[in-house]
């Protein structure tokens, strides 16, 4: 979404057209959604991510990558880590709102603009498309761009998270829900008051209906991933040694009733079954397909899941800052495995696992102890919820160190050509 109207002024050219828009912006927050984004804060957060990725001392051939969902979360981290570590080139797809005279652009719009600047500074060659990755027209545009400019794809990263998806075959719009399956769910949750003080609340969810479960699988499962790989195969755009990965999550037994055993978990199971279908039927010896089980992270997608904010804060408390693995850390790890710099870390279901640091039994035992009395846990380590609040706000460009939020800022940032 874009932001709320904000006071500001427009600089007008001699021809009368508006050329710049500077505004004083203040964040308008609704729970774990901030409906206006700060351009400089978003840009600086991307720079911080980039600088956290160690550059590779040497590189071989620059692989061609297609990253779907490249404007946020793990997709953005994998895009930048792939560029800085391995010099990837190719296409990055996001779906963002430009904003208008009354609203800021979405945070992903501003993040993409800064990511493109970093690509240019690094001498890279990545084309950024603002388009719905679920649409057949987007697939056609990407395939043409690949054929004309980049050639066969070495790595397809599928990192889409959306509340809805239009089925390209039927035109039906499916809406995902976050609900348990089979039984109601009640859990403590973490909220923040107007002064950003952590508070405990309770979340109560009724079980999903079968249509709700099926719709969530349609949105968040593997159907669209399969369409993308088939399209690449049909156009002879699979590189030698082609690998595709889709991002997934398992998480703790603490969150399992609303996540892994809920509607989102049903979608992730479909995603994992799709990996096997792609491997056996579509690729048939011409490449590899894996789901990647990442560890916990503070992302726009994860903050929408009830109780995950509290769990993530307690996990941070259990681990401490030195053992936390950021999305960038995990992206570096994944690229090392995809490029054979390190062996694949596969589980019994042939999923690449990046979450050992989170699911270490000793760590989970400590989290469970904290979860048994979350009020005491938050009181004993107030730095953990403060850390979560800062990371959540940074997703929208707020509370980023080094940004002057009192100054007006240019909000009309162009999408990179």
Image (spheres, grey):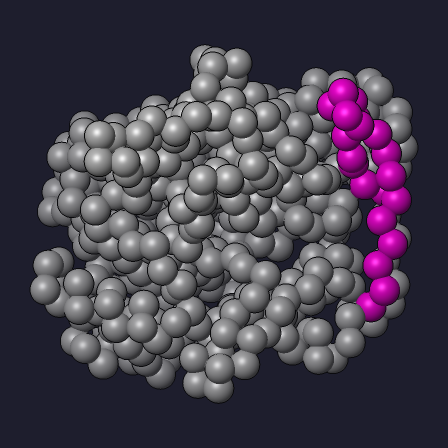
**Image spot of residue 153 (x, y percent):** 21, 62
Quick check: 277 above or below 406? below
Quick check: 95 above or below 288? above
Quick check: 70 above or below 133? above
Front-most of residues 375 and 163: 163
Front-most of residues 127 and 286: 127
Q: Main secondary structure of the magenta part?
A: strand
**Image spot of residue 325 (x, y percent):** 52, 33
Asked if residue 274 is among those painted magenta in the image, a careful observer would answer no
Q: Residue at x 32, y 36 (%)?
A: 18
Quick check: 345 above or below 387? below
Front-most of residues 61 and 121: 121
Looking at the rendering, which quadrant does residue 152 occupy?
A: bottom left
**Image spot of residue 393 (x, y percent):** 59, 30
Q: Residue at x 82, y 18 (%)?
A: 380
Asked if residue 197 is among those painted magenta in the image, a careful observer would answer yes
**Image spot of residue 220 (x, y percent):** 55, 66
Q: Which residues are magenta?
A: 188-207
Q: In the drawing, does residue 74 fall left or right of residue 179?
A: left
């Amino acid at each position: 979404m874009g932001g709320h109207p904000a006071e500001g002024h427009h600089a007008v050219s001699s021809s009368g057209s508006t050329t710049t828009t500077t505004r004083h912006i203040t964040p308008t927050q609704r729970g774990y959604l901030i409906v206006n984004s700060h351009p400089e804060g978003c840009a600086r957060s991307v720079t911080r991510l980039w600088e956290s990725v160690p550059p590779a001392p040497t590189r071989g051939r620059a692989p061609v990558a297609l990253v779907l969902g490249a404007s946020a979360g793990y997709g953005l981290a994998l895009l930048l880590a792939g560029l800085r570590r391995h010099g990837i080139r190719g296409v990055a797809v996001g779906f963002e709102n430009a904003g208008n005279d009354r609203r800021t652009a979405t945070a992903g719009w501003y993040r993409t603009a800064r990511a493109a600047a970093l690509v240019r500074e690094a001498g890279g060659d990545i084309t950024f498309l603002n388009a719905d990755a679920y649409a057949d027209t987007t697939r056609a545009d990407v395939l043409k761009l690949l054929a004309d400019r980049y050639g066969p794809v070495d790595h397809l990263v599928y990192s889409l998270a959306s509340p809805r998806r239009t089925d390209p075959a039927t035109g039906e719009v499916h809406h995902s829900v976050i609900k348990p399956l089979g039984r109601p769910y009640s859990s403590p949750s973490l909220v923040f008051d107007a002064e950003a003080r952590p508070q405990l609340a309770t979340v109560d969810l009724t079980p999903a209906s079968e249509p709700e479960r099926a719709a969530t699988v349609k949105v968040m499962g593997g159907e669209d991933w399969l369409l993308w790989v088939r399209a690449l195969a049909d156009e002879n755009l699979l590189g030698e040694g082609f690998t595709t990965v889709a991002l997934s999550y398992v998480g703790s037994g603490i969150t399992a009733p609303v996540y892994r055993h809920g509607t989102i978990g049903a979608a992730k199971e479909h995603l994992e079954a799709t990996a096997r279908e792609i491997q056996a039927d579509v690729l048939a010896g011409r490449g590899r397909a894996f789901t990647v089980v990442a560890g916990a992270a503070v992302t726009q997608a994860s903050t929408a899941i009830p109780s995950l904010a509290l769990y993530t804060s307690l996990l941070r408390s259990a681990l401490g800052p030195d053992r936390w693995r950021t999305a960038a850390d995990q992206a570096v790890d994944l690229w090392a495995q995809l490029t054979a710099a390190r062996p694949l870390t596969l589980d019994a279901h042939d999923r690449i696992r990046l979450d050992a640091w989170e699911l270490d039994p000793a760590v989970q035992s400590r989290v469970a102890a904290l979860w048994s009395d979350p009020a005491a846990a938050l009181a004993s380590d107030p730095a953990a919820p403060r850390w979560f609040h800062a990371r959540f706000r940074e997703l929208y460009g707020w509370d980023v160190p080094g940004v002057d939020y009192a100054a007006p800022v240019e909000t009309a940032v162009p999408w990179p050509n």
